[in-house]
Image (cartoon, grey):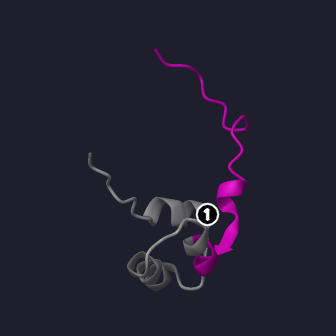
Amino acid sequence: MSTHFQSDFVKGERLREVLRVEDFADRYRLDDMQRRDLLKLFGQFATLQELLTNRRIPREYR
């Protein structure tokens, strides 16, 4: 079943927030390799959405 989506209902203002890549890496405890890759990809600054979609989440096995 589908419903009508109202774009003004969802506010993505927080995702457009511009952050320093170093601060993001510290906050999310990224390792040095991921930090380096994000810096190569975006430079010193990027939006929160870009950083969240490009980070790698380590897999945890039982």
Q: Is residue 15 magenta?
A: yes
Residue 43 sits in which quadrant? bottom right
Up/down of 24 relative to 9, above or below: below
Taking the view exactly as shown, the residue that stands out farthest to the left is 62
Q: Please state the horizontal and vertical placement of residue 59, each as a whole percent of the image.
A: 32, 55
Q: Please state the horizontal and vertical placement of residue 28, each as a whole percent of the image.
A: 55, 65
Residue 14 sits in which quadrant? bottom right
Depth check: give the residue in front, 45 or 33: 33
Quarter of the picture holding the C terminus: top left
Give the residue displayed 43% in from the left and 75% down from the top.
31
Residue density around tag 1, few if under 14, some if 14–19, many if 20 or more, within 10 Å: some
Give the residue displayed 61% in from the left and 63% down from the top.
48
Depth check: give the residue in front, 43 or 35: 35
Q: Is residue 54 magenta?
A: no
Taking the view exactly as shown, the residue that stands out farthest to the front is 62
Give the residue displayed 44% in from the left and 84% down from the top.
36
Q: Amino acid at mark 1?
A: Leu
Up/down of 11 relative to 46, above or below: above
Q: Please state the horizontal and vertical placement of residue 19, each as a whole percent of the image.
A: 67, 73
The residue stretch that appears in magenta: 1-24
Depth check: give the residue in front, 51 or 12: 51
Up/down of 48 relative to 5, above or below: below
Up/down of 1 relative to 31, above or below: above
In the displayed structure, does residue 5 sit left or right of residue 35? right
Mark 1 lies on a secondary structure that is helix
Give the residue displayed 69% in from the left and 39% down from the top.
10
Pointer 1: what residue? 48
Q: Please state the horizontal and vertical placement of residue 54, each as a whole percent of the image.
A: 44, 65
- What is the count of numbered marks? 1
